[in-house]
Image (cartoon, rainbow, N blue to C red):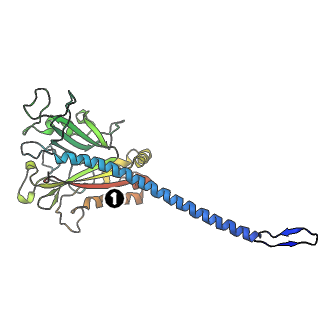
Amino acid sequence: MKETSISKAGFKRWGGFTLLELLMSITVMTVIILMVAQLMSNATAITRTSNKHIDTDTQARVALDRMALDFAQMLKRTDVDYYFKGLADYKGHGNGHAWGQKVQSGQKGSDQIAFFTQVPGYYPSTGSKSPLSLVAYRINENTSTGNPSYLMLERLGKGLVWNGVSNTNIPIVFLPLTIDAMWPAAVKNDNSGASRDSDYETIGPQIFRFEYYYLLKNGRLNGVPWDTDAGHTTINGLTDVQALGVTIAVIDPAGRAIINAANPNSLDDLASDLADFKTAPGRGVGQANKYIGGLEASWQTTLLSVINGGITSSGTPVPLEAAKAIRFYTRYFDLRAF
């Protein structure tokens, strides 16, 4: 408290703060305000990042849980067809590869898969439930202008009946009839009319990359669903497959909007840079893409390169905030346990 004194004129004189004291007070207050503002800014950034992760986590969980239901009831029989990726000479089956390379001439981007499952579907004619379905998954790669599902994960579900059950509803087909011969849209993925089907639904609008591979009973990760070490050359009802590994790339809605606004080709070029799975032993220590987790590590390395450089390998710019919003997820579905 400042002291008071009586002047010769008889008036009280109050002592005030000096200019130096005022400046020091203002400086201290400014520092405190800046510190609080910085804390608020950091909290906002953390909250924004957390929300992005919640968005991608939710999207991935919904899609992978849907796959789990379908894979759990998959028909594993030697007399039905599977549209699974395999070697180049696995005729008509794949729309995928396992060479550990980026998309290039003659190669597809994301994988496709189609199979029969005992998960109920719906009959197109009546809308009632069916006892089994044809199910397919793909990343829509139809580049036609105005395609609302471009670079999004889609699921095809067609309600079927067992042979001889109905004269009106479509029955399941047995070999030598194949999925691609009966339902072209389950295996095609281009701008042709044959790749379109009204039974496709978008279940992962932020999922833009889909890759799968096989964990064989011999402990090896493989890009073909049979054990070549045992001399096997056919899928044989998935007899050699222990589990199916699925890896997806997800971007949050705001990040997708940013990247599309910057350049319509950015997301496609980025997806093309994410190399496919490479067939190799699961015990390959120190060898890229030859162990569980190797595919995700490869994708993460590519993404960090894009984040640091700001462009894809083809030179397409990618906004930093959009690239930082991308996350990768993997789940293994044990086929033998079902």
Q: How many marks?
A: 1
* Residue 203 or residue 69, whichever sits in front: 69
In percent of width and height, residue 310 lies at 42, 56
* Residue 2 or residue 120, whichever sits in front: 2
* Relative to 174, 153 lies left or right: right
* Residue 141 or residue 283, whichever sits in front: 283
**2 to 84, vertically: above or below:** below
> Where does label 1 land, which residue?
302
**173 to 314, vertically: above or below:** above
In percent of width and height, residue 125 lies at 20, 27
Residue at 31% in and 54% down: 273
Quadrant housing residue 177? top left
Residue at 11% in and 50% down: 238
In percent of width and height, residue 192 lies at 25, 35
For badge 1, the amino acid type reads Thr
Residue 318 seen from this side? no
Residue 62 seen from this side? yes
**210 to 303, vertically: above or below:** above
In percent of width and height, residue 149 lies at 33, 39
* Relative to 109, 120 lies left or right: left
For label 1, count other residues whose C-alpha is less than 10 Å away and answer few (under 14), some (14-19) or many (20+): some
* Residue 48 or residue 251, whichever sits in front: 48
* Relative to 257, 76 lies left or right: left
* Relative to 331, 310 lies left or right: right
Quadrant housing residue 214? bottom left
